Amino acid sequence: MVIREITKNVHGIIMNDWDRRLFDELIPLPDGTTYNAYLIKDEKNVLVDTSDPSKSEKFIRVLKDLSGGRIDYIVSNHSEQDHSGCIPRVLEEFSGSRVIASDKGVSLLTKLLHIPEERCMKVADGEELSTGSRRLRFMYAPWVHWPETMITCDIDDRILFPCDLFGSHLATSSFYASCNERLYSSAKRYYAEIMMPFRNNIRKHLRLVENLDIGIIAPSHGPVYNNPDFIVSAYRDWVSDSVKNEVVIPYVSMHGSVARMVDFFVDSLIRKGIEAKPFNLTATDVGELAMSLVDAATVVLGTPTVLTGPHPSAVYATYLFKVLRPKTRFISVIGSFGWGGNMLKSITDMLPSGNLEILSPVIVNGYPGNPDFESLENLAKTILEKHKELNLL
């Protein structure tokens, strides 16, 4: 746990979860995570977000001590339980407190946590609350990354509380962000896994943030940014339409055919000055794969045929690509089969519609030979030309 006064009477409460290694039973957490809440002490004491239920006992003890025994309002920027999970305990321990949330936020909280609606206060987009010496402004930010999400701005102290936006799954003893490669990687991974499907929404909300006079960004996961430009600039790049001269190659191989194709294909791309990023799906950290998709201009999926369709790992990778909605421009498939099947059709039918261009696949019957390697070389040449058209080389 890390507690620090950000500005006079505004305290950050960071609960470290050093050992957590999986989020939503899906997302790997190699560096653990944190659950951040913020206490504003004024004529009205306001708690911005809470903590994960697993930290409730410690969180309540800290809150009682820090608040002097009084909480008037609990701002719920986002109803997901890692931020809202301690609200019922706070309402129980601080009997006069009320929950502030968006209209949809109140609806979700009553369903997810059975919070009585009479203990809730709905706020409109842009509405402000005076705590005494400062003003809090509530701004709706739907689909970042749930439909009820809002962000809160302490106008007078110039602090933005964006909940999940700008967060990072990074347990650390440091309160403020050390703007280095480790933090950048952690924040990018977080964006890739959670925020990337909502890139267009985030782009709009980013403009909202850029128009505010902000000195500190205090997210609900990871360290606090006292240099906001570091994370805002990173997000500006990630949500843009610009891609990089990179080819991501998620693949799985059962009897060596696809592995041999991938090995040849990667070498061919490298010779042409294209950065190749192969991911063996039987051993890949899905977060690393997601992060690689943030910037890649091209994705090439490698899969054998199992019965009549693609390998289940390849199906999962295709589904992941579809739901994450990266800004990838080109996609193709390389793979093998024995006696037949619909592997290629199964994969292409799963791909998202839109501006994604499907390049000619390379599908081999059996183990690849010289004609197949020539086809792989031609695919690499096609990718080179496509990347040149985008001025990536």
Image: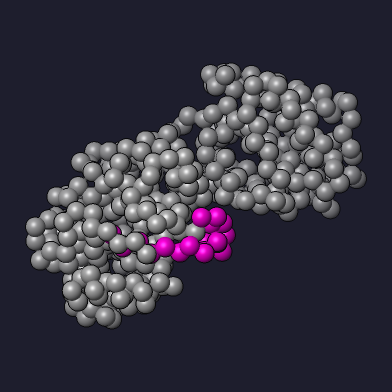
Is residue 25 highlighted in magenta? yes
Q: Where is residue 369 drawn, in percent x and y?
A: 89, 30
Quadrant in which the C terminus is drawn: top right
Apparent side of residue 383 relative to residue 108 in the rendered image (left or right): right
Is residue 214 highlighted in magenta? no
Residue 100 in view of the camera: no
Residue closest to the eye, 219 or 300 = 219
Apparent side of residue 279 relative to residue 102 in the rendered image (left or right): right
- Quick check: 67 above or below 95? above
Residue shown at 55% from the left, 61% from the top = 21
Residue closest to the eye, 99 or 143 = 99
Q: Where is residue 345 drawn, in percent x and y?
A: 73, 43
Q: Where is residue 240 drawn, in percent x and y?
A: 43, 33
Image: magenta residue range? 12-31
Q: Where is residue 389 drawn, in percent x and y?
A: 57, 18
Residue 81 in view of the camera: yes
Residue shown at 30% from the left, 76% from the top = 61
Image-quadrant location for residue 259:
top right
User: Hey, which residue is sitting farthest front in the picture?
Assistant: 173
Residue shown at 68% from the left, 20% from the top = 272
Image-quadrant location for residue 222:
bottom left
